[in-house]
Amino acid sequence: MQKLIEGFGNTPPLWKNEQFGLQQFQQPVYHGFTYVPFDIPARLRLGHQMEYVFKQLLVLSQQYELHGSNLLIEEGKTRIGELDFIVKELSSNRYVHVELAYKFYIIDPEISEPIYRLVGPNRRDMFFTKLDKLKTKHLPLLYHESLNDFWANLKIDPVEIQQECCFKAQLFAPYDSIPSIRPLNTACLIGKWIRFDEFNNLGFQKAHFYLPKKQEWVIEPHPKVKWLTHFETLMEVNLQMVKENAPMLWMQKPSGEIEKLFVVWW
């Protein structure tokens, strides 16, 4: 779990300061924390696991007080959404509504605009649609009348609460190029992606590979894993291609260098 926390903390924000009308939240400093073990339900998808990690960092932080998390928004018996986190910044006494996102995007160079180039490895998730949902659906929920009692207990007016995003991402460029992603944060570029037909060639036969579990996608690759040959990896990856899943690989080159690599099916 410590590696998961470190992986989250070391992942850069997708943009710095304010972009797209959204202010990036200054995450708690995680170095030097007294680590308190906590369980994350194994069946949770990775995004929800990141919520557990972020909550842990807020609780242990000396910068913020956590006043609410996963606040349900309901109309009658219908759940229409939730607020991720309500925190108080101790240095300024300001309250902040923080929406959290942790994403893995590949960069499609065939699309001209940078914010439209970022797509999920399986092409079922796109940055610009996530951005639109944050601005038009998630953030406005702060003012929903179902939260009136919650604000009354805190003795604050939601109009005075600032809204920010903690939007972290790992970006993967085409194997043979690095297209422009400005105004996004280039520090998020941490790996490559390739199509299966391109992966199935002689250029990769001398490398060794590891298929990390989804939780390991977040962390820095390391050599202390069970490496597979290119032939063994092809069989494993081919099974994922049939299911239209794009796996992440750790690739150890003959030089010993390790890099992250997505193999896509489309």
Image: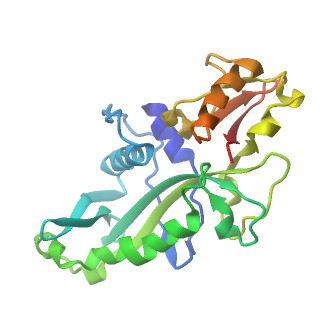
Q: Is residue 202 above or below residue 110?
A: above
Drawn side of residue 8 relative to residue 62, left or right: right
Q: Quadrant of the N terminus?
A: top left
- Residue 155 appears in the figure: no
* Residue 185 horizontal/vertical position (percent): 66, 62
Q: Nearer the viewer, residue 21 or 241?
A: 241
Image mark count? 0
Drawn side of residue 80 relative to residue 221, left or right: left
Q: Quadrant of residue 52?
A: top left
* Residue 252 horizontal/vertical position (percent): 75, 26
Drawn side of residue 44 relative to residue 156, left or right: right
Residue at x 61% of width, y 28% of height = 211
Residue at x 66% of width, y 33% of height = 249
Q: Quadrant of residue 136?
A: bottom left
- Residue 143 appears in the figure: yes
Residue at x 65% of width, y 69% of height = 115
* Residue 7 horizontal/vertical position (percent): 53, 40
Q: Is residue 22 above or below residue 78?
A: below
Q: Nearer the viewer, residue 146 or 220?
A: 146
